[in-house]
């Protein structure tokens, strides 16, 4: 446990000092502040538009940060051989991967927290009061990011950052379209339905984490809307990190 | 004591290391020599547990390497570290991975000549400074066994002399040092024993003086490889 925390702390320091992060974060802040403008050109729906754009912006920028930092996380360690130094010490591959995971997770979560503060301030400024409902949406976003970091880490154990970024984004897109896939094959043959069901249950269903529309319209999420995605993210992340460890063990570093 | 018995490593169908057996006694400096691609780095990676042998046994203190990681230090060839950390932060990170934290980071930085650069980010380091930091992280846990892959590469003559002095002092403290090197004059100067590997096979293991006779190590080494 101590080694995981040590590696996580170092990964957090490394990622938080990456200049790419500052660039993306600056764009994110500009976007969140610009939602004031989007709100003012809407017809009487200022607050709703600000909330909608704000939450979508936080989501998009969190994904961008994760793609940039996550897909090179393990690849860089292998390429630059820093992995040699770590694994020659009393550290196992799974401790190393968990440390990297928690370090990046802390770094992205901190960015989400800062973006959320700006978003809440903008909503308050536009007369929406304290938008506590958005916090439920942000909580689920954090758990979606945990799952997405695990995906990025898995890809970064065997592919270049560019290829890893492409695979992760494709998986993200599919993960948000699985419901549509099931609807699409409703009237198709048994084989197509079987195939769609296999894909639906194997690939990560990321729409479980999306309650943005509901909270923007003031609908309170139920307990299961929150707890079920959290458990889903935790279990899926464990499986992905175990696969990443298996992939790394099989490689001759 | 390091005991290596019938160690082999095969990648696809290529035998990189074949039937290598060696014994390195405690408190010795052992130079592991060979031409490029002979299998030196692969052997060292197996010795420190980074690579799994295809067959054979490696024992340190009569038990497996994975049970002895607290006792070893390793410096990879051409080391590269985390750019955004300072030297002190990096060494603190490395030290926290061990249960035993006996060495003082400031003293280690002083020993390897990086005391003034302790708050400097690693991305600003020269190759020689990275080499010094590589040695510092290898001795951070006060290891009994030290594995160094080309430790003298990238150092200026003063740096090389300082490193050799450090190795000799570590030997005086009873540490065992196993190192790969191309710089044969340095090997001749500080090693008690040498091993020569060529095309994955150990072709000599023993005393440096016996191997050299009246020749320099470089001449004896070249002659041995040509005759092979």
Image (tube, rainbow, N blue to C red):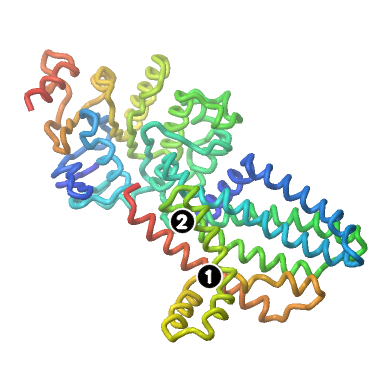
Residue at point 14%, 32% (across, down) = B205
Residue at point 29%, 19% (across, down) = B186
First in sequence: mark 2 vs mark 1 = 2
Per the image, label 2 sits on a secondary structure element best described as helix
Q: Is residue A60 above or below residue B94?
A: below
Disc 2 packing (10 Å; few <14; some 14–19; many ≥20): many
Which subunit holds the residue at mark 1? A
Looking at this view, is A62 or A191 the one in front?
A: A191
Marks 2 and 1, how far apart in space? 15 Å
Could one spot residue B98 in this view of the protein?
Answer: no
Looking at this view, is A220 or B217 the one in front?
A: A220
Mark 2 near mark 1, Cβ–Cβ under 8 Å? no
Which residue position holds label 1? A204
- Left/right placement of residue B179 relative to residue B221 reads right
How many numbered tags mark residues here? Answer: 2
- Left/right placement of residue B138 relative to residue A209 reads left
* Residue farthest along the left direction in this orientation: B227
Task: Identify the mark at residue A155; answer none if there is no mark.
Answer: 2
Looking at this view, is A189 or A146 the one in front?
A: A189
Which subunit holds the residue at mark 2? A
């Amino acid at each position: 446990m101590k080694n995981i925390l040590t590696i996580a702390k170092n990964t957090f320091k490394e990622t938080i000092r990456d200049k790419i992060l500052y660039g993306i974060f600056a764009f994110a802040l500009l976007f969140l502040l610009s939602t004031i403008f989007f709100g003012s050109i809407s017809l009487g729906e200022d607050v709703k538009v600000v909330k909608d754009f704000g939450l979508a912006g936080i989501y998009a920028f969190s994904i961008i940060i994760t793609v940039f930092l996550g897909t090179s996380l393990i690849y860089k360690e292998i390429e630059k051989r820093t992995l040699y130094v770590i694994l020659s010490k009393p550290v196992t591959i799974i401790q190393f991967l968990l440390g990297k995971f928690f370090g990046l997770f802390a770094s992205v979560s901190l960015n989400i927290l800062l973006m959320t503060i700006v978003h809440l301030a903008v909503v308050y400024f536009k007369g929406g009061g304290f938008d506590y409902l958005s916090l439920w949406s942000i909580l689920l976003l954090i758990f979606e990011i945990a799952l997405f970091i695990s995906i990025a880490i898995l890809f970064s154990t065997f592919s270049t950052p560019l290829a890893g970024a492409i695979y992760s984004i494709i998986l993200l897109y599919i993960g948000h379209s699985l419901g549509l896939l099931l609807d699409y094959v409703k009237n198709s043959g048994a084989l197509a339905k079987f195939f769609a069901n296999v894909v639906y249950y194997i690939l990560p269903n990321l729409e479980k984490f999306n309650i943005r529309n509901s909270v923007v319209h003031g609908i309170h999420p139920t307990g299961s809307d929150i707890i079920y995605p959290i458990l889903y993210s935790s279990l899926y992340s464990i499986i992905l990190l175990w696969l990443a460890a298996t992939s790394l063990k099989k490689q001759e570093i | 004591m390091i005991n290596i018995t019938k160690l082999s490593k095969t990648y696809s169908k290529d035998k990189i290391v074949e039937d290598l057996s060696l014994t390195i006694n405690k408190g010795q400096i052992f130079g592991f020599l060979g031409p490029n691609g002979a299998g030196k780095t692969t052997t060292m990676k197996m010795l420190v547990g980074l690579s799994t042998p295809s067959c054979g046994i490696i024992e340190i203190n009569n038990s497996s390497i994975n049970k002895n990681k607290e006792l070893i230090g390793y410096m990879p060839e051409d080391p590269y570290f985390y750019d955004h950390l300072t030297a002190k932060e990096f060494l603190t990170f490395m030290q926290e991975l061990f249960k035993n934290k006996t060495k003082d980071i400031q003293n280690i930085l002083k020993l390897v000549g990086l005391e003034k650069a302790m708050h400097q980010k690693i991305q600003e380091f020269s190759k020689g400074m990275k080499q010094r930091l590589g040695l510092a992280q290898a001795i951070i846990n006060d290891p009994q066994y030290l594995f160094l892959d080309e430790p003298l590469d990238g150092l200026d003559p003063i740096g090389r002399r300082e490193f050799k002095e450090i190795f000799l002092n570590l030997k005086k403290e009873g540490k065992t040092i196993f190192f790969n090197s191309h710089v044969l004059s340095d090997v001749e100067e500080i090693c008690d024993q040498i091993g020569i590997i060529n095309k994955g096979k150990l072709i000599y293991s023993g005393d440096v003086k016996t191997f050299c006779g009246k020749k320099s190590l470089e001449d004896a080494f070249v002659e041995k490889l040509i005759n092979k």
